[in-house]
Image: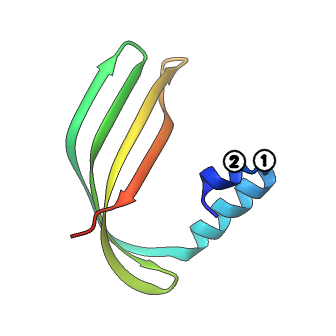
Amino acid sequence: MSVLGAWRNGYGRREIDELFAALEKSFSDCTSYVFELQAYDVSGDMAYTAGLEHTSASVGGEPRTYTLRATQVYRREEGEWRVAHRHGDTVTD
C-alpha cells in the first residue's frame, strides 16, 4: 500500500511510521546519488524544485540503478525551510 493509500484509508500515525520503517530497511548501500535540477522557484515562504534523481543503491538486497522524476515543495517555518510535500515516480524509457 502506498503512503497516500494508507492516508486515504484512515490509517493512523503508527501505521504510517511502520510503513516508513519497512521502506527504510529495504534500501541500503547507496553508492551514487545525483540530483539533476530542471526547474525551481521561490515565492515568499513557499518554494519548489523539480528534477531527476539518479540513484544506485540496493533495494531489498539487490543492486539497482534507477531514475526518479522528483518534485518537492518547501515551506519556510520559523525561518527554516522544510519539505511540505514530495512526489517521485520512476522514469521509464
What quarter of the picture does the C terminus occupy?
A: bottom left
Residue 47 x %, y %: 36, 26
Q: How are the residues colored?
A: rainbow
Label 1, residues with CA under 10 Å away: few <14, some 14-19, many ≥20: few
Q: Amino acid at mark 2?
A: Trp
Q: Residue at x 80, y 54 (%)?
A: 14
Q: Amino acid at mark 1?
A: Gly
Q: Which residue is mark 1?
A: 10
Q: CA distance from mark 1 to mark 2?
A: 5 Å
Quarter-wise, where is residue 72 in the image?
Answer: top left
Residue 68 to residue 38: above or below: below
Residue 61: mark: none
Residue 81 x %, y %: 45, 28
Residues at circles 1 and 2 in contact by the CB criterion of under 8 Å: yes
Residue 85 x %, y %: 50, 38
Tell me if 49 is positioned left or right of 88 in this view: left
Q: Name the outermost residue toward the top.
A: 44
Give the secondary structure at mark 2: helix
Quarter-wise, where is residue 44 in the image?
Answer: top left
Tell me if 78 is positioned left or right of 88 in this view: right
Give the secondary structure at mark 1: loop
Tell me if 92 is positioned left or right of 80 in this view: left
Residue 15 x %, y %: 77, 57
Q: Residue at x 43, y 16 (%)?
A: 45
Q: Nearer the viewer, residue 52 or 57?
A: 52
Q: Residue at x 65, y 69 (%)?
A: 22
Q: Which residue is mark 2?
A: 7
